[in-house]
Amino acid sequence: VDFYIIFATFFNISSNNIIYMLLNTLFYFLLLKILLFYFLYVIIILYRFFYHIIIIFHVHIIFMIINVFIFTTIIVFIISISIIITVIILICVYIYM
């Protein structure tokens, strides 16, 4: 999969097509986001399993949900900013070529 992504990026940059470049970067960020959410899901499962022994279960779950929500919003914000920056850079590169 990694080899395919690298090959696709190389091919799209060499073909000088801005739409394919944008689609490829968006696909890459989407893949990254999916991996991040999968990682968060595993963390939630481990967290629940670990705190299942404690009597004050519901309070911990509420705090965990708040923390995860804040964490995911920060991650999505960072990803969106990076996508916007990459789009601007790609447009600038396309204009100056």
Image: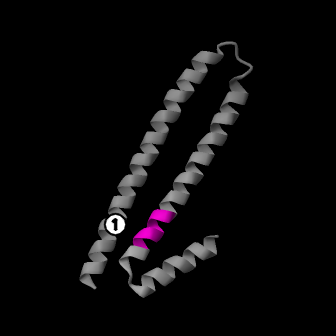
Q: Position of residue 68 (x, y in %)?
A: 52, 34
Q: Position of residue 9 (x, y in %)?
A: 50, 77
Residue beneath the point at 65% across and 17% down: 57
Q: Quadrant of residue 85?
A: bottom left
Q: Position of residue 35 (x, y in %)?
A: 59, 53
Element under label 1? helix
* Callout 1 amino acid: Val
Q: Quadrant of residue 94?
A: bottom left
In the picture as drawn, the residue positioned furthest to the top comes out as: 55
- Magenta part of the protein: which range? 21-27
Q: Position of residue 60 (x, y in %)?
A: 60, 21
Q: Is residue 72 magenta?
A: no
Q: Quadrant of residue 15?
A: bottom left
To which residue does mark 1 refer?
87
Q: Are there few (<14), some (14-19), or many (20+) residues within 10 Å of tag 1?
A: some
Task: Classify residue 4 as left or right of residue 71.
Answer: right
Task: Classify residue 16 as left or right of residue 52.
Answer: left
What is the tally of numbered marks visible in this picture? 1
Residue beneath the point at 68% across and 35% down: 45
Residue beneath the point at 50% across and 83% down: 11
Nearest the viewer among 94 and 54 is 94
Q: Is residue 22 magenta?
A: yes
Is 77 drawn above or below residue 63 in the view shown?
below
- Indicate the quadrant containing the N terminus: top left, top right, bottom left or bottom right: bottom right
Q: Main secondary structure of the magenta part?
A: helix
